[in-house]
Amino acid sequence: MPELPEMEAWRRALDDPVAAFPIEKAGPAHVATLKTFDPPLSALDGRRLAGAKRRAKRLLFPTEDGELVLLVHLMSAGRLRYLKAGEKGPKTPAFRLLFEGGGQLVLTEGGPKKRAGVWLLTPEAAEAELEHLGPEALGLGAKRLGEILADQPRRLHSLLRDQRVIAGIGRAWANEILHAAKLSPFAPAQGLSPGQVQTLADAIDSELERGLELRERGAKDAKVYRVHNKLDEPCHVCGTPIARVDFEEHTIYYCPQCQTGGRVLKDRRLSRLLR
Ligand SMILES: [Zn+2]
């Protein structure tokens, strides 16, 4: 699933093109993709967008007149692209905006499952839709992070991915951030020293910024990630093979030398069964 660096790179790429011309026609939209019916999509026709904004992993396209907001959540397989006039697009996009001048914003989704969503909302409804999200991960800072962690007995990897606590980090960037901070994915959040909180805050910023910079240059996963999905590849810091542990519904990648003092973490699902 695209996370903060991926979404922010897309936001920056879309910001100017979507505001260049008024919308000529909004839609069509796949019935499973469009999550709202009032106001109707046609309410966008003739209006101009004020650019692309982002909150956590969602993209927001407010209209210039301040009356409507188009909210897009790509989930894991959705892709949003701007096609210039005359550029060939997909035959049946999940969602499409046609602009005057012939440019198009198209949402496509690989695979049979339609999970990506598009909402057309009033600004008040958009605010309510985003209300549950925690503060943005990028630029959070050690002070705020320390306050958040102090209340949390949960383990770091799970906590970092909880959008209600900190918004924008998912599985991949949690792996990258915890490796950069040299912290165990299973360390309880409450137990961090002030120095470790500072290190973690720095790692959140440096890793998300590194990701954003690479994504803006079009880099693919294999180049962007150094720990995530790198099982048995040498750690870029110490050379130890990257390890993997299955935990609940997902998989964590980490370096046993850099992050867990040489200990290999047990598969939590298995160890729970054997306890
Ligand atoms: Zn290492």
Image (cartoon, rainbow, N blue to C red):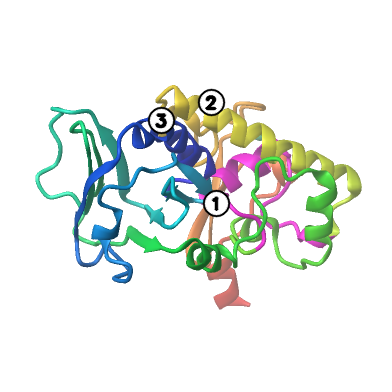
Q: CA distance from mark 3 to mark 1?
A: 20 Å
Q: The disc labelled 3 sits on which kind of residue?
A: Asp
Q: The disc labelled 1 sits on which kind of residue?
A: Ala
Q: Is residue 87 in view?
A: yes
Disc 3 within 8 angstroms of ligand 1 (CB): no
Q: CA distance from mark 2 to mark 1?
A: 17 Å
First reached walking from the N terminus: tag 2 or tag 3: 3
Front tag of 3 and 1: 3
User: Up-down: is 102 above or below 263?
Assistant: above
Q: The disc labelled 2 sits on which kind of residue?
A: Glu
Q: Is residue 259 left or right of residue 34?
A: right
First reached walking from the N terminus: tag 2 or tag 1: 1
Which image quadrant is residue 81 in? top left
Q: Position of residue 162 (x, y in %)?
A: 60, 61
Query: Which stretch is magenta?
Result: 165-190
Q: Position of residue 234 (x, y in %)?
A: 55, 29
User: Up-down: is 270 above or below 183?
Assistant: below
| Residue pictured at 22% horizontal, 28% vertical | 84
Quadrant containing the C terminus in the rendered view: bottom right
Q: Which residue is mark 2?
A: 213
